[in-house]
Image (spheres, grey):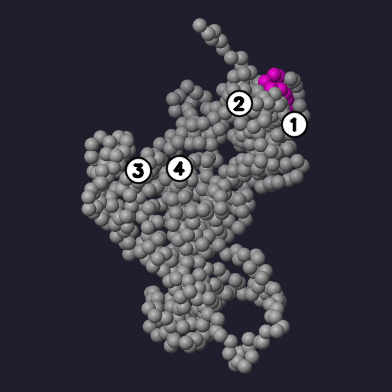
Amino acid sequence: MPYIRRLPDTLVNRIAAGEVVERPAAALKELVENAIDAGARRIGITLAEGGLGAIEVTDDGCGMAPAEMALALERHATSKLPESLIGADEAIELVATLGFRGEALPSIASVARLSLDSRPAGAGEGWRIVIDHGAVVSAGPAAIPPGTRVRVEDLFARVPARRKFLRSARSEYAACLDVVRRLAMARPDIGFTLSHDGRRVLAVQPGEALADRVAQIVARELKDNGLAIALERGELRLSGIAGLPTYNRGVADHQYLFVNGRPVKDRLLTGAVRGAYADMLARDRHAVLALFLDLPAQEVDVNVHPAKTEVRFRDAAAVRGFIVSGLRQALASGDRRSAQAPDAAAMGRWQAEPVAPAAEPSIFAGTGWGGAPAMGSVREQAMPWTGPGTASAVAPAGRAEPADALPEDAAQFPLGIARGQVAGTYIVAEAADGLVLVDQHAAHERLVLERLRAAGAGEAAARSQALLLPEVVELDETDCDRLEAALPQLTRLGLAAERFGPDAMLVRALPHALGTADPGKLLRDLADDLAANGVDAERGALLLGEKLDLVLATMACHGSVRAGRVLSVAEMNALLREMERTPRSGQCNHGRPTWVKLAMSDVEKLFGRK
């Protein structure tokens, strides 16, 4: 029989530290969260070698007495649970602080040299405790202002198996910076400073507005290219800033998500964001945003993992549906704008002096305005595009239409009055405050999609198309149970199916717009979606609804005015007016901008007038 014995406390702490403190950024996160929970108004952070050399966190919070400091360094000792909740079954569910497990300080102290200095407000002096890899080295008075200072050095110095798996100082610093940014966004009422190897990297003042704090940390352009979010549904509240679809990134690391003030990295939330932007972004582009979800503490479990970056919702489908519908509603009501940052290289080429080859004859020789061919001349084509407000009269073939004077009410037209067309693709318009360029295909693609939706094409696309021969799809019994429970919602979206034995479904009809889809693959995808997100009685199966959105976007793309199509001035103006009335007209269905504006002051600068 093998001999069973208890592990020593130092080894237990090192094993536990593997989950809580996996890298310098994890240790930094725990220390800053402790400072926030202590009621600090200002938190100073100093790093050396990306946190591999040293981490120091100083705050002006409540501080600790010597006896409390000794207790804080013991495992599972915490001040975060009120005495009234000690022993209560719901204690963890009702916790309102960032930390509550009582593992961080002892775990860090077991794998590093930790110096803990603290002084409560009103105390005559502070106290210091130094622990070197689990062993108390010294304890005594310390000169420190009210608050707490924690310094961590030589992380994993005596655990070489863990030390060798750490990344370079640059990579570890990037992870630490990300942690500080997220916590600083979560608490705009607190001031944060971060220094790395003697260089000040981040400095934000306490008491800032949420929008200002987010824009300062994420990107200053976000404030001008984003929408403020403030939504409520029952006890759920969603706030923050969502970037315009045209203001996007190639990676998803500029999506900051918070639940009850806690930074999280949750697959359900990121999936909801992806679903909300589905028909406005290309597949390889990602939205830039900071979203703050608040809900009752008993509706979310924050005790899923020791790192506390994962959460679990009691009603995941309701949370996902709220975020998807809320973001779409906000973007539809306010995102007629487009990200207006012209490409710097393209603007630079505008200022380059053109040099014609000396041997070439002048293109203006023998012409009135040279007889030069009219670039982008407006000509009537067969089957002209028409839209709401299109004038019936068009220019005769081969003759450019005269440009009218800018009307007095031009300020009512943000996209201006059409003046011509370039390369059969771009509309040039004059607005009261600048020059507007419109991508006619991208713009019309968005208009057609919104027309289809407004006319109920979503319901039309969801009409059933009966299969010639019903198809039997074999699935796991649990997947069949989920699909059977969701059949009323699936039927409303055009999918006619029924249970066919314990582990199979019989598909009789598919949504009309998905008539060529593989029934087996569709049902398996739906079952996976229901397993992850459940079903929302109001929206139906989330995945099927999003698939139909993608189908409508494809239909709109194929039914839009193509690049290279010459339009009349009346057609161009009709397009501009409809864009001004249409939600989400600032970007096409793939997330590209539909128009850009060059302010008149910028035009004057190009010609040296300013």
Q: Residue at x 75, y 31 (%)?
A: 144
Residue type, numbered disc 2: Ala
* Horizontal relation, residue 73 to residue 556: left or right: right
Q: Which mark is residue 268?
A: 4
Give the farthest residue toward the top. 1
The front one of 86 and 535 is 535
The front one of 30 and 156 is 156
From where the camera sits, is residue 41 visible?
A: no
Q: Quadrant of the C terminus?
A: bottom right
Residue type, numbered disc 4: Leu
Counting from the top left corner in percent of width and height, residue 62 is at 64, 32
Give the mark nearer the N terminus: 1 vs 3.
1
From where the camera sits, is residue 262 visible?
A: yes
Between marks 3 and 4 in the image, the one whose residue lies nearer the viewer: 3
Residue type, numbered disc 3: Arg
Q: Which mark is residue 17?
A: 2
Give the mark nearer the N terminus: 3 vs 4.
4
- Residue 30, by quadrant, is top right
Which contiguous range is marked in magenta? 124-136
Residue ID for mark 3: 524
- Distance from disc 3 to disc 2, alpha carbons, whole Å, reads 40 Å
- Distance from disc 3 to disc 4, alpha carbons, whole Å, reads 19 Å
Check the image and report above or below for 144 versus 462: above
Dominant SS of magenta comes to: strand
Residue ID for mark 1: 144
Q: Is residue 148 magenta?
A: no
Give the farthest residue toward the front. 359
